[in-house]
Image (cartoon, helix red, strand yellow):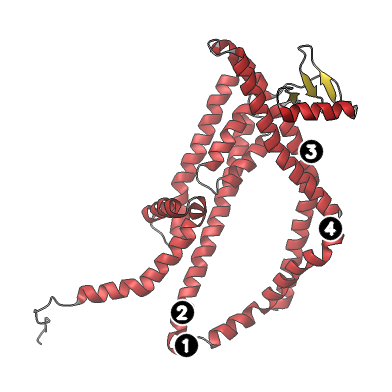
């Protein structure tokens, strides 16, 4: 098959798939994330002691915003569905349910923590909502930015077409005495890095599906959303569990069976994290040519030196370092080890 035909077909299919995913995902994600935000935080209560909330309330009153209402307890809130009845979020339900067991803690403090959690959760998810709505706007006005957006696929397309020619030109201009060795090293690095990213993608997809299925069986709402968040964030060790588990616990809230569901959620995330910890070094370490112990040490070392960025790139860097070490440093070490001790004549065997 000619390279031009293959690149055209593959590149075209990829662009169509990405475009369809952006259009469908962009328009559905905003509604889905907004639904998650309301379910988690409920209708926002405006604290008149908070300058930001007080300003928002004043602005809504001046504009006669129909969403502004007051509940029987005298708290102002924003009714998202214009019903005038405040929707209580999962966070507040959990806090109220736990309040009788925490009688020693002042009720005002509990209410303040509840409002703070609701505000933070709502604001955090609002970022996702705004991003999704921004994506909708971007898609609808894509023609205005077509000249810029067109350049990246155009460059990528012609780079793919000319990649073989580029390889031939670069290879032809390598030092002749070292050409085969350089090509061998580059090919090994390429295969190791490709294996790492392929294995990382497989693990993320597997974790997403496993978490989604297990949470659905337990009866957790928005199980797919939690599974995707957990799978995507699992690129950083333990981050998928740290973020996904609290979300799953919150969405699992049911007054009658919340305790049992919380235990089930914790078991699910513990099992998925344990399985990933067992499979990750073996699967990826084997594919990239790293021993599981070297794999784990690379995460600790590069994480310590470069922080989060080092954890993300620890394995690719370790792969490159190992290949270069084996190619250039190890032969010198072996040659030094084979030398005779000073003052000792070399062992000459006689026939």
243 is higher (above) or lower (below) than 45: below
Q: Give the SS element for disc 2.
A: helix
Mark identifier at residue 109: none
Q: Give the SS element for disc 4.
A: helix
Residue at which label 4 appears: 142
Location of residue 319 by image quarter: bottom left
Residue at which label 3 appears: 31
- Circles 2 and 1: CB distance less than 8 Å? yes
**Is residue 166 shown left or right of residue 128?**
left
Residue at which label 2 appears: 182
Whether residue 144 is visible, yes or no, is yes
| Cα–Cα span, label 3 and label 2 | 52 Å
Coordinates of residue 18 in the picture (x, y in percent): 74, 57
Coordinates of residue 153 in the picture (x, y in percent): 74, 67
Which of the pair 141/123 is nearer the observer?
123
- Name the residue located 46 percent from the left edge and 40 percent from the top edge: 274
Which of the pair 301/210 is nearer the observer?
301
- Name the residue located 38 percent from the left edge and 53 percent from the top edge: 297
- Circles 2 and 4: CB distance less than 8 Å? no
Q: Disc 3 or 2, which lies upstream in sequence? A: 3
Q: Disc 2 or 4, which lies upstream in sequence? A: 4
Q: Disc 4 or 3, which lies upstream in sequence? A: 3
- Name the residue located 76 percent from the left edge and 35 percent from the top edge: 34
Coordinates of residue 142 in the picture (x, y in percent): 84, 58
| Cα–Cα span, label 3 and label 1 | 59 Å
Q: Give the SS element for disc 1.
A: loop
Which of the pair 279/30 is nearer the observer?
30
Q: Give the SS element for disc 3.
A: helix
**Is residue 313 shown left or right of residue 83?**
left
Coordinates of residue 114 in the picture (x, y in percent): 64, 22
Q: Nearer the viewer, mark 4 or mark 3?
A: 4
């Amino acid at each position: 098959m000619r390279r031009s035909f293959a690149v055209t077909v593959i590149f075209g299919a990829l662009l169509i798939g990405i475009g369809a995913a952006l259009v469908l995902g962009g328009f559905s994600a905003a509604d889905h994330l907004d639904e998650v935000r309301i379910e988690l935080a409920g209708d926002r209560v405006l604290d008149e002691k908070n300058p930001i909330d007080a300003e928002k309330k004043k602005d809504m009153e001046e504009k006669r915003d129909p969403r502004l209402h007051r509940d029987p307890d005298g708290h102002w809130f924003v009714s998202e569905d214009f019903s005038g009845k405040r929707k209580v979020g999962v966070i507040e339900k959990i806090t109220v349910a736990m309040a009788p067991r925490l009688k020693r803690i002042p009720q005002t403090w509990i209410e303040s923590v509840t409002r703070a959690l609701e505000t933070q959760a709502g604001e955090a998810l609002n970022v996702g909502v705004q991003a999704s709505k921004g994506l909708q706007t971007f898609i609808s006005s894509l023609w205005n930015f077509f000249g810029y957006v067109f350049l990246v696929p155009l460059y990528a397309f012609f780079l793919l077409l000319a990649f073989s020619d580029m390889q031939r030109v670069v290879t032809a201009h390598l030092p002749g005495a070292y050409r085969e060795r350089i090509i061998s090293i580059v090919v090994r690095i390429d295969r190791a890095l490709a294996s790492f990213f392929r294995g990382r993608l497989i693990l993320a997809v597997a974790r997403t599906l496993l978490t989604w299925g297990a949470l659905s069986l337990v009866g957790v709402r928005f199980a797919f959303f939690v599974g995707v968040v957990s799978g995507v964030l699992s690129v950083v060790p333990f981050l998928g569990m740290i973020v996904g588990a609290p979300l799953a616990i919150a969405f699992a809230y049911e007054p009658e069976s919340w305790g049992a569901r919380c235990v089930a959620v914790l078991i699910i995330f513990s099992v998925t994290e344990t399985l990933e910890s067992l499979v990750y070094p073996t699967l990826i370490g084997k594919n990239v040519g790293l021993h599981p112990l070297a794999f784990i040490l690379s995460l600790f070392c590069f994480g310590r030196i470069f922080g989060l960025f080092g954890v993300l790139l620890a394995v690719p860097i370790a792969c490159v370092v190992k290949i270069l070490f084996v190619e250039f440093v190890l032969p010198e070490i072996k040659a030094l080890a084979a030398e005779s001790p000073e003052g000792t004549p070399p062992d000459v065997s006689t026939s």
